[in-house]
Amino acid sequence: MIGFLHPWVLLGLAAAGLPLLLHLLARREPPALEFPAVRYLMETARRHERRLKVQNYLLLILRTLLVLALVLGASGPHVDTRLGAGHVPGALVLVVDNSLSSGAVVDGVPVLTQLREAAGRVLSEATPADTLWLLTADGIPRRGSPEALRQSVAGLSPLSLRMDLGEALRTAEDVLRGSGQIVVVSDFQLTALSALPALSALSVLAVRPSGSPPANWGVTSIDPGHQPWTTDGGAVRILVSGPAQATAPLTLRVGDRPARRGLASAGVPLGISSPTVPAGWWPVAAELDPDEVRADDRRVTAVRVLPVAGVAWPSDEPYLLAAAEVLQAGGRFRRGSEVALGFLGPNASVVEPPKDPAGIEVLNRRLGERGVAWRYGRLSLEAVASDSGELVGRERVLRRYGLEPVGNARTGVLATAGGAPWIVRSGRVVLIGSRLDPEWTSLPVSAAFIPLLDALVNRMARGEVATVETAPGDPAPVPDLATEVRAGNRTWPVEGGARFRPPEPGIYYFLAGRDTLGALSVNPDPRESELTRATDSQIRGLWPGTRIVSTTEAATAGFFGSARADLTGPLLWLALTLGLVELLVASGRGSRA
Amino acid sequence: MAPVSPPSERPRLDLLDPHEVARLGGLELVTQGVVEGFLAGLHRSPRRGFSVEFAEHRMYQPGDEPRYVDWKILGRADRLYVKQFEEETNLRAILVLDVSQSMGWTGAPGSVLTKLAYAQRLAAALALVLLRQRDAVGLITFDEAVRSVTPARARTTHWHQLLRVLSATTAGKGTAAEPALRRVVDLLRRRGLVVLISDLLLDQELALQALRFLRHRGHQVMVLHLMDPAEVRLSGPAEARFVDPETGRAVTLRPKDWAAAYEATVEAAVRAWLLACRREDIHYFRITTDTPFGLALRAALTQAPAAV
């Protein structure tokens, strides 16, 4: 059976009529010439007309065949040369997409089942003489005999990994080193396709399942907001993907606290407040009802919960006093010594410059003793505005001390005014460049003042902890002091500053002895939730020359590279030969008597 | 007094391009020039075997036949003289000239004479050569019928009569040589020489029949077959409709495709004429109209049959 890589080029077959068309168009009335020896011409015509007519027809046929050969050659024809008798031994990389999306159930059958069967059919055509590799979503090519790979394929299950098919082809190309063929058995999610710079001369066969993918709901994002939470809990923003104009019930679980529920719409953030939780590290999970793809119905993260900070604040600063009392009344502060607000205390501190400029030197000395990396500098009376940021909006700053880093370090800048550091953090000490007084800055009389104090005390001074989010198998940075990673009962020894690749979804905690330094939230790549499949033209657009068959045709199409002969070369040689013969016939037409 | 170039330094008109020669002057002047050049270039008499009477001596020139050297004078005076003979008139020749429409054609009007123009000059030159040998020369022109008849005379002034007839001749219509050749019988009571000058685009069978008849009457017959170079090698635009001006018959073809086959056909036709003439002991020469007159005369006269 003959097939074509570029069947649209066959439209050019219409050009085969060009020689005949040109011949007909050229049949016009020629000029008349007086010539007495017409009798010789007529005698010549009588003798040679038959031969010339044959030559003309031959030329017409040759030129038509030449066009046909060129067009057919350009359309990438290949013909089945096996005739049921095996194939020429060759190298083949079988890419089987067992990514998360392959777990989708279509008509009661998981997609991966179809893919496994198709891959098995391809391998059933393999012989021990073939060189075979199997490449799955984990990205590791494994070489084996047909039987071994058949067993591997039969044991495949959907992974929570994403499989970039373009990346897989590149890996396969590296394995084959320019010689062989690649069979990609995949559901061909549109989000899994990526372009290739060039696919050398390798033959690529795409085997795809029939039918349409089901509508799928998946949790694509879960954001617990700023941490740490207080024991009053926090708000979680959740994003889901799914059918447009539809809603799906969503459940939020924080540890073992009672679940909260909401209705989620695709692409619309849903905010759910958590219940109150005790201090500590807590897992947070957003869950959808089970559907065709189970692995993306749940997404997790971790939050750190701390009790309300015990704060000491001065009683002679009216604005600071008023704000602290409001926060105390609101349950965000309690009287205590855990955090010093407005001065440098023995523990965590939010420090403003002293009223007396002479006290700056003393304060700087004490900061040095605490190992703080910032110092107060010269007083500036230049009126500037704070630069709008996440922590502070745009406020007027009339007076401020310059904040100068020790050495070259400039880390920990939380807010700037006039382009210069205005609020900085070093460890558990926060320095503010201006006093919290309207003569220095408009901040104390603005609405942002109380939330700012809340953030500085409860988040910044007490040490903000952010969970790191990644996908299974992707590397995540390990905090400097961490010595161990724990998930449930499993532990992995790690080295601070290195990279850790979580094997599966879940929450992983970075530990240093008995202290928990942070958490790693591992969830499937949200692109796996989008099951829309690429069309054949989209696949060919990204991977030119790819042959596409359904899973049921995998057996006959497998080993097409060695079982199907590429006719492009022979046809182009035929065209060249026809061109030479045409040249000979055309030149011989006038020279032979 | 204008300096006179020695004979060896004068341009040989008989060897120049016919078209260029024809531009030098009228029929008489050109023909005389051609004949002078032709005779000066001959190494021996074209008419060996004539009955002749001694006329005078002249100085030996390189190329003269040794048998005409007067050995007695050489012995007495140690000088080389050759004997010159006054030729007797014993040959009557009739030039039969085809003046049909096809003879008025040339494939390159600016550079090649028409076949008729070439034939006029060739006939005039032949007549002059023959008359100088005291032969009697007559002329018949024909197209589809006999156009003019000039009886054979041996007088020198007769050449001018022939020139007048030749000059007044224009291309006629169709071609029929047989009546003209039959008419020769009336003009040649004794055996003589008949020269047919034609492009032979005529009925070959009828013409050969008439020529055969003349041979049977004992006449020597010579056929000068004139062809235009463009009739020998076919050329033209990519495709053309070739029309015979006499018959109106036409054929459409691509000259490039047919050139080789056409040349073969022409060669076959020429060979057919040659073989047919050879069978009847008729002398046949093909002459293209770009051939210098001297070469044409040499071909005709040096191989012509001896006078009867």
Image (cartoon, coloured by chain):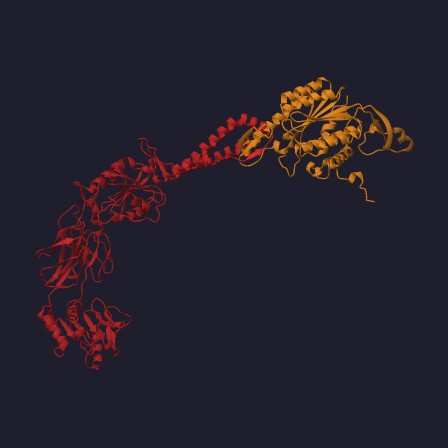
Chain B: what color? orange
Number of marks present in the image shown: 0
Image coordinates for residue B89, horizontal then vertical, percent: 81, 24
Query: Is A391 rendered above or below residue A84?
Result: below
Residue at the farthest top position: B216
Q: Considering depth in this image, is A581 or B91 the residue closer to the camera?
A: B91
Q: Residue at x 44, y 35 (%)?
A: A19
Percent x, y of residue A92:
31, 40
Left or right: A299, with B52 as reference point: left
In the rendered view of the protein, which quadrant contains the N terminus of chain B? top right
User: Depth check: B293 or A113 in front?
Assistant: B293
| Residue B254 in the figure: left or right of residue A407 | right
- Depth check: give the residue in front, B277 or A272: B277
For chain A, the rendered hue is: red
Q: Quadrant of residue A331?
A: bottom left
- Up-down: is A551 above or below B65? below
Coordinates of residue B125 in the picture (x, y in percent): 74, 31
Q: Is residue B108 above or below residue B53?
A: below
Q: Is residue A470 above or below residue A10?
A: below
**Rendering coords of residue A91 (x, y %):** 32, 40
